[in-house]
Image: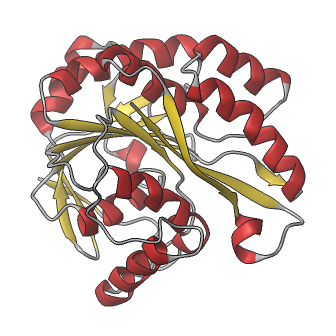
Amino acid sequence: MQIRTPAVAGMFYPNQTEKLKSLVHDCFLHHYGPGKIPPTDYTKKIYGVICPHAGYVYSGPVACHSFYAISSNLIELFIIVGPNHWGIGCNIASMKDCSWETPLGNVEVDSEAVKELSNISELVELDFFSHTKEHSIEVQVQILQEVFRNQFKILPVVMIDQTKNTAIELGRCIATIAKKNNAMIIGSSDFTHYEENDFAHKQDKALIEPILDMDLETFYKVLNTKKITACGYGAIATTMIACKELGATKGELLKYATSGDISGDKSSVVGYGSIIFT
C-alpha cells in the first residue's frame, strides 16, 4: 500500500501532533469559529458541506462551522472533492490502495468505493501523482481526525477540469457512491482571492446566493460574468449536484469571513465560506 505523505504540514498547519490538536481546538473556539467544541446537537439531515482550505490560522475558524454541524454523525466515508491547484496529473483524479499520512496518524482511502466511482464515471482516473502536492483535500483530513475518532475512510477527488458539464457528471456519480455508504460529501474551496476586503465580500455574496439556491446555471453565470476567483468552483458545483441527487433542497451559509477579517490586513484578502446542504 502506498503512503501519501503530507504536502503542507508545517506550513498550513503544525506538523507536531500536540500543536496541531491545540490549533484545531482553538479554531473551534475562535471568535470567527462556532465557539463550541463538538459534538453538536444539530438535528437536520446534512448531505454535504463546503469548506475552505487555507492555512488553519486564516480559514480554520470558518471551516470548523461545517465540521461542527456534522460532528454528531457517525460517518464512515468522507468523499472529499477539491481543485488541483498545481495542474499536475489527470483532469479528474482519485487514488486507491493508499493511506494518507498525517501528524495525527494515517487515514485509509476506501479503495472499493474509488474503484466503483472510476467504473461508473469515465472522467475519473486513478493517479497517485495528481494528489502529491495538492493541499485542498489534505487540510480537511486532520480536522476530520480530531472531530471523528472512529475509523473513517476517505475518497479523494481532485479536479483540473472544473467545467459545468464535468461537475454535473461527477456529482451524479459521487451521489451514486454516497447512496451505498454512510457518507458525507465535502467540497473544498476558497472564494475570492487577493482583492480588497469590501470587494471580496461583495463578490462572494453574489456567488454564494446561487449556491444556497442550489442553482448551478446561475452559479456558473455569476462566476464567469463577475470573474470571481473561487479556486474550487468545480468542487462546489460537484458537491451541489451530488447533494441535490441525494435529496438536498437548499444550502445554508453558516459563516463567511475573509483572511482580512481574521488577520486585520484587509488590503488583499481571500474569502472563506462554510456552507451545508440540507
- Residue 68 placed where, x, y %? 36, 58
Q: Quadrant of residue 194?
A: bottom right
Give above or below for 175 relative to 25: above
Whether residue 160 appears in this view of the structure is no
Q: In the figure, 127 relative to 65: above or below?
A: above
> Looking at the picture, how far across and down is residue 67, in whole percent?
37, 55
Colour convention of the picture: secondary structure
Q: Nearer the viewer, residue 121 or 221?
A: 221
Residue in the image at 48% along x and 25% along y: 250
* Nearer-the-camera pick, 240 or 205: 205
Q: Quadrant of residue 80?
A: top left
Q: Is residue 151 left or right of residue 62?
A: left
Is residue 50 placed above or below 142 in the rendered structure? above
> Quick check: 69 left or right of 177?
right
Q: Position of residue 62 (x, y in %)?
A: 55, 60
Vertical comparison of 14 with 97: above or below? below
Quadrant where the C terminus is found in the figure: top left
x, y (%) of residue 83?
52, 40
Q: Please give the count of numbered marks on the rendered protein.
A: 0
User: Residue, x 83% and y 42% (percent of image)?
Assistant: 202
Residue 168 appearing in the image: yes
Q: Is residue 191 left or right of residue 110?
A: right
Residue 255 falls left or right of residue 48:
right
> What residue is drawn where x is 84% and y is 21%?
225
